[in-house]
Image (cartoon, grey):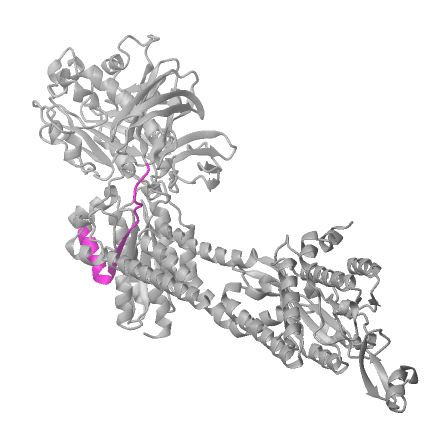
Amino acid sequence: MSKVSAKYFDPETLAKIQPLALRSRFLLEGYLAGLHRSPHRGQSVEFAEHREYAPGDDIRQVDWKVFARTDKYYLKQFEDETNLVVVVILDGSESMSFHSNERGLTKLEYAQLAALSLAYLVLDQRDAVALIPMTGEDRWLPPSNQPQRWQDMILMMEQMPSRASVPFGSMLGSVATKLNRRSLIVVLSDFLDELNPVFQSVRHWKFDGHDICFLQILDHAEQEFPFSQTTKFLGLEGWPNQTVDPVTIRESYLSEFRSHQSLLRAFCHQAEVDYEVFSTERPLSFHLPKFLGRRRNLLRQGRSHVG
Amino acid sequence: MSADLLPSLIFAVGFLSPWMLAWGLGIAVPIAVHLWRRQHRREIAWPAMRFLIAAIQKKSRRTQFEQWLLLALRCLAILGLSIAVAQPFVASKTLIGLGAGRTPTWTVLILDASFSMNHQGLGTSPWNEAQAWLDQFFSGRVEGDAVAFIEMSEPSTAIIPVASRNIAKVREATKNSAVLDTTADLSATLQLAIEVASQSKLVAPEDARFETIFLSDLGANTWSAMEQPEVEQLFQKLASVSSIELIPCQPEEFAPNLAVMDLRIEPSMPYLGQSANIWARIRNFSDKRLNEIPVQLLIDGRTIISRSVDFDIESECEVVFDWTPGREGNHILEVALAPDGLLNDNQRWLSIDVRQQSRILVFETVNDSSRFLRAALAPMGPDDDRSNLTVEARNIQRWRDVRFEDYQAIMLCDCRLPDNAFDNAIRSYLSSGGRLVVWFGDQSQRGEYDRWTESADQNPNLMPFRLNSISVRGNYLLDPRCVSNLRVPNSQLLGEAGGSGRFASRFLRVFADFPEGGLLTTPFYQYQKIQNLDPKRVAIELSFENNDPWILSSRWEAGDILWMTSPPTLNPADPERSWNALPAWPSFLPLVQELTLSLLESVAEVRNIRVGDAIEAFPASRLLGSIVVTRPDGTSFETKVPSGEDRSWRYLDTLRRGIYSLAMEQGDQFLHVAVNVDPTESDPRKFRSVQLPPSLQTSTIQGNHGNGAPVQDHSRWIVSILVTVLLLLLVETMYSAWMRRARQ
């Protein structure tokens, strides 16, 4: 088993996630373990309600017993329990290869670990998982609720290049064509690129009825800018190099960074997108349970999103 | 103040300790740290470059300005500190000149080139200090200024005799100037400076300001001449045509210096196989005891003896080496010391001739009249092998039978002169370095000897006086106090006891320690009176009580001549007719021996001269072609042998110590001349500027290192600079603290 795989199977991380369930904010058309109730009335065994027949309805759904008692045509509707489809979109742009602590995980590695942890939970409750790595290549794993899917994801992640030079936002536009069911889209990215393309994609997904989660993976250095000596910052994804005394520009940098974060947070609030920041300096076992717990509470409270 | 005056103001600043400016290189530290921080930076791939670039665009200019400001403050603080420890002063006169408006300054620069300027101090020497000052001086010259340049030595030389506006040329001349092995002649330098200033004034614009600047280590041996009224007058005369500034060039502390003050050999003309003592007088001029100092004796460049000698504080000792010559001919003796603070006085050379014997030819007119003289010259008989002198007597009429060149000295013992051919032969003999003693007596004919006075050509007369009458018969006694020597002051001639038996004349010095020798009691009855004495060419070695001379000395070309106005003859048959009782007197033998030896030794004097003295040679007629002088540095100078009657030849470029070899055209070396420094220049004592005339003290001294000179108030400058440095450091501290707070 490779080093990366070992990280994915971190027993401590998975053990902490195990008792928690991932719930969709909306009633999806799943029924697995009663956790995911779908608004679709389908071929399930659990009765939901009756409604009057209308031309065009499937006559196989006419409740003949009711017709016998009432002489009216009513359709017998069942709550269709189907698998939740969780689409994991993983940012593979060059900026995700950053880690300020040489002994720590890169943002990509951290995101992969988070994605696998979520996938594990989803698959464990018989839901389907799809993986779309944003690497500039057209390779992805379509939704599947087979346990093997988890192994497939690991394999793909291990082969995933982490130096995509194409900006993450511009790659998201192609995702919509891959989604033919309403899904829970979990986007794992640092969201440090231009946000407008991201916002456009999100609006498109929302229009298609998808639920969206933004998990922003950030390094501690990006958030605190803790450098003290003159440093040559090497630009990624086409940005030029800059040599500066970090102490002198820290305040200004943080101001710019916070402004960016505020913009992202405001958009998520407005678009009802779940938004959570995962800091790579903290273990995933800190962020994931916290995130999942908050989602469960929100579902119970009937709130639509975490803002 | 206009902008064009600013450079003059800046470069009017000098430094008493300019080497301390090296601390200014300390500004390299903050600059290096600054660059190091830029160069040795951390590199990191940065994903959030968007925000970084935005931040840089906002902050970068201000931040860079703050960084540069801090760097400038730190550099200024270090520079200020280095300037303060270099003890700056401002050339007040320059400032006065600036204050009065822009007038061209014409300067007579006088640079002391005596060898004491080479005395090493703490990392520098007076010469280096002078050169550093000159650099600043020339940098401060502006258009319209002119500079003349005099090298103060002995003799002083006007390198740029009229002030030149071509500052680069003068600067080059000062750069090319070097410390010589000479002393410095203040009096002659002042005369030269007056002349140069006067000449320069003729071509200077009317509004030009004249200044004379001395750069000197203020050696007491040079500047004590200021106490002489005539020198002070010259100074005042110079001050009347030019303002005078004196720049003392004195390092903080001088390194210890030992000097070979004197080198002599006894006997001064050693003979083959006979032991001789070589005396080296060495002085420790430092206030430190110096132990185990190696002193070496070198003969012809080879180390013969090496000794380790201890020297007490500021003491003098004589080191004696025993040496037995094993080869005839010319030898170079050298005593050398280990290198010390002043290298120029660590060696001394002596050029000597070693002979197997000296041959003396005695001419007489009356046969056997010279027997007493011959007996005194060879007291053990003419065949005595132990004697170094071989004496032969000839009747002067048979002078053609002998070759004069075969004899080291010729004596005319109460002789008539044969003919003109004899005169010419004597001249030729003397011109090639011969020695002649003429004893006048009743045989000496005035008319004949007048030939030696009346010279047909322009040559100096062989005899620089005329014979007068013979004195009346009487009793005459010698008195050394009555020497009317016009060449040497009586005070020097007579010695400490004022004539109580001490004889300063080199021919008579044996009697100084031998008062009972009887010289002064020798009875004289008659003597040859002389007249028309040429005081510039003749020295009276000993006189009678009536001031009439008995012994006179003169030179003719390379030859030395002694003139004795009363002969060493005695008429035993009729003592009353004798001119004196000299041959019967106990002083006779030592007198004759000493006269002869001194005369022979004078050969060595020609070969041992002081730096700056001329090398004189009188090539004999047989020497034709050219003379090649090989200097101590190995360079050669070729010159033609003078033709015609005047065969005197002089070589003046002896400003470097060492051995000068003279060779004929064919390359046969025939003379080695030892040129030694004047040891008085080794004395590190400095002339205290308080001893300068009051009018010069108050206005001329720029500053000094604690030698009593009126120090200009440069301490005020130092304090001001130090306060500025403190303020800079304070500002830097507050500013960097403010910057840190602002970042947080």
Q: Residue at x 58, y 62 (%)?
A: A221
Front-most of residues A86 and A142: A86
Residue B501 is left or right of residue A138, and the answer is left
In this rendering, the count of numbered labels is 0
Front-most of residues B470 and B100: B100
Q: Quadrant of the C terminus of chain B?
A: bottom left
Residue A286 placed where, x, y %? 62, 60
Front-most of residues B191 and A26: A26
Residue A215 placed where, x, y %? 67, 68
Residue B685 sits in quarter = top left
Instruction: Indicate yes or no whether the magenta region holds residue B234.
Output: yes
Instruction: Indicate yes or no whether the magenta region holds residue A163.
Output: no
Q: Is residue B241 visible?
A: yes
Segment tinted magenta in the rendering: B232-255
Answer above or below: position of A273 versus B140: below
Q: Can residue B411 be seen in this view?
A: no
**Residue extending furthest toward the front:** A69
Answer above or below: position of B550 versus A170: above
Residue B443 placed where, x, y %? 21, 23
